[in-house]
Amino acid sequence: MSERKTLTVPNEEIVEQKLYIEELKSKLWGKGLTYHIVTYGCQMNVHDSENLAGMLADMGYTETSEQHEADVILFNTCCVRENAELRVYGNIGSLKAYKQANPNRIIGVCGCMMQQSDIADYIKKTFPFVDVIFGTHNLHRFPGLLLQALDSNHTIIEIMDTEGKIVEHIPVKRATGVSAWVTIMYGCNNFCSYCIVPHVRGRERSRRPDDILEEIQTLANEGYKEITLLGQNVNSYGKDLEQNYLFHQLLRDSTKIEGIERIRFMTSHPKDLSDELIYAMAEHGKLSKHIHLPIQSGSNRILRDMNRKYTKEDYLERVKKIRSIMPDISLTTDIIVGFPGETEEDFRETLKLVEQVGYDSAFTFLYSPRKGTPAANKTNQIEQEVKKERLARLNNKLNKSSNERNLIYKDKLVKVLVEGPSKTKEDIYTGRTDTNKIVNFESCPDLVGKLVSIRIKKAQTWSLEGEVVPNG
Ligand code: SAM
Ligand code: SF4
């Protein structure tokens, strides 16, 4: 990469929003106002919520975990599957009583669901107490919209149909002090036939390398030890940039930033997983030895109908290559069951592939028809009962595989980045291996944010248990 000398000036949209933030700050000063954000869906949404939290914190709001007490309640929505949408409707409905209890409270609904043409209007009509509705492309404009909502009795709606340019320097308030999400690109060009993401997140847009590396440097200065680079298909990072700079180069440059001990990334599309990326991962100790490589189905016929642009043979060849160079790598995946037209034979091919690969873990989903996607219009939809029965069989096989993969760790010494106390017991701490395995162990607050050696004593399906080995 060329020398890192240019630091971007905040773009004019952000300058404008900062003025709104200042206006809100003086307007709300001393009122002790609070916010509560509910996030649905993937890590990209989680990170968007960190930006919303950052903007609210700059206005003087503080976070509360008690939704019913909050002065601003935001729902950041997901539309990848129908059940996520149904949950959102149910949960918005239950906010009516809160609004009646405190009419000054602001209720906002944003995110992917709002980018679907009729949903914002439906929400406005069905839940007239919602104060502000906005989409994914204008998240950075939240301060201006909040200001309007505070001054109005009507629902403020702003949805942008096109993605526009990338906006840098949006305030951010991250959840933990050890590990941080960094979005490296937005949108997706793949148009898998079942998927709504390209329709609501727009086309692929890569952030400039300098902006990303500057953000990682800032995170290192703030004491973060681990970063996860995010994108719907990180392997196509950079293909839209003017300069010749691809994902493996970004990874290599990220490893040069002192203070960052580990670098993770997700998600990788199998068709774009390059040899250069595999070699970079093998060479650099800081690059996590874990790849999330969604297969979706083990049947070539279904993969073709899904528009995935690889065959199971291509996929297995990639896995073979990865494992020949990094034998200890952990591999995880996403699988959809019950895609339209999936026969028992197709499904068995998925089971067979799961056995062949030996995944460390997987996210599995019942196919959910999404309006506006080609697969939703197919007439050969699979019955819900059949989908559920297949999902149970698949999960059974995957659980066995996870258990077997975890057993490999028994009695081994692993390096774990300590994240913090576990949710269950005060003196039990939790962290992750390089291969993204969750490890629980007895520890103390001093070790949070440190890489410690742990001897694994017990392997379970979802996690490992171990003991700290001092000076290990
Ligand atoms: N871009 C990533 C990729 O292609 O691997 C994943 C994005 S998507 C938010 C996460 C997962 O949701 C997908 O890998 C897929 O398994 C699942 N998914 C997407 N659309 C779905 C649908 N209509 N029904 C069920 N699962 C779906
Ligand atoms: Fe959706 Fe496919 Fe893009 Fe992933 S690669 S976001 S599954 S269209």
Image (cartoon, helix red, strand yellow):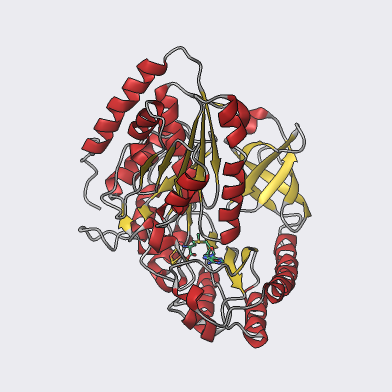
* Rendered location of residue 418, percent (x, y): 62, 39
Using residue 194 as the reference point, say whether residue 462 is left or right of it: right
Question: Residue 6's image quarter?
Answer: top left
If the picture is divided into quarters, which one holds ligand 2?
A: bottom left
Residue 202 is left or right of residue 281, and the answer is left
Query: Image height check: is 385 above or below 74?
Result: below
Q: Position of residue 460 (x, y in %)?
A: 77, 56
Return the x and y of residue 308 as percentages of the image width and height.
45, 76
Tell which of 38 and 238 is nearer to you.
38
Q: Kindly indicate the quadrant of the structure image that contains residue 374.
A: bottom left
Q: Is residue 309 visible?
A: yes
Residue 378 or 164: which is nearer the viewer? 378
Total numbered labels: 0
Q: Residue at x 73, y 48 (%)?
A: 455
- Is any atom of residue 435 visible in this view? no
Q: Is residue 64 above or below residue 116?
A: above
- Residue appearing at x 55%, y 61% in the figure: 81
